[in-house]
Image: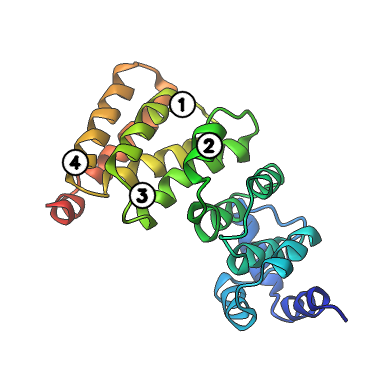
Amino acid sequence: MTDVEFITAELKTLSEPGFLEKMARFGIDTSKALGVRIPEVRKLAKQIGKNQEISLALWETGIHESRILASIIGDHKLVTEKQIDQWSHEFSSWDVCDQACGNLFVKTPYFKQKALEYTLAEPEFVKRTGFVLMAEAAVHLKKEANETFIGFLPIIEREAADQRNFVKKAINWALRQIGKRNAILHNHAIDTCNNILDQRNKKANWVALDALRELQSEKVLNKIG
């Protein structure tokens, strides 16, 4: 039995039919899913440790949880631009997209380049990837310069009218996370929200109004001082 076969068997023992139904209710593509909770996937990842070879092999199984596991155990230092392109074009569920971005892609030297590139893409999940990379960078890359995020905001403004569910939610997420990063970016994000509203495009309004609700909340204002 190969490592991948053993890991797949382990995942199957952790599957819960009831949780599989819950995943579907959250808009997750369960056509190739087992129904394993993320904390259980992370426990298994901790046992395996970082392993780029197994990560790539797990991805090729096409199994939903195996692909999430692949993103956790992958070595960002060994991830190539070609791998990011391949995985991103194979996303079929928002959670796999988000896990791959947060666990792996955002840690690579390619994150900014891919964020800019993918926000111009047509496929829904590829375009989502671009904006999720922005959001994840705002949360996790503590040393990234403000200029990076200021550069992302005109793209958010430009694409705010995309009505596809998994795109518009990622655009909104990116806008909110950038605005919560610090006081300087908060001001820029508020300006972006107002610029979106000034477009007088009903399709874009939700992105701005929902972001403003959080960015102008007492909790966020206290956080950024």
Q: Quadrant of residue 148?
A: top left
Discs 1, 2 touching: Cβ within 8 Å: yes
Q: Which mark is residue 76?
A: none
Disc 2 and disc 4: Cα gap in Å? 26 Å
The quarter in which the N terminus is drawn is: bottom right
What amino acid is labelled 4 in the image? Answer: Ile
Residue 167's disc number: 2
Read off the residue under disc 4. 184
- Residue bearing the label numbered 1: 159
Q: Residue at x 21, y 48 (%)?
A: 182
What is the secondary structure assignment of the residue under circle 4?
Answer: helix
Q: CA distance from mark 4 to mark 1?
A: 22 Å
State the separation of the CA atoms marked 1 and 3: 18 Å
In this view, 202 is above or below 96: above
* First-in-chain label (4 vs 1): 1
Q: Residues within 10 Å of mark 4 (few under 14, many from 20)?
A: some
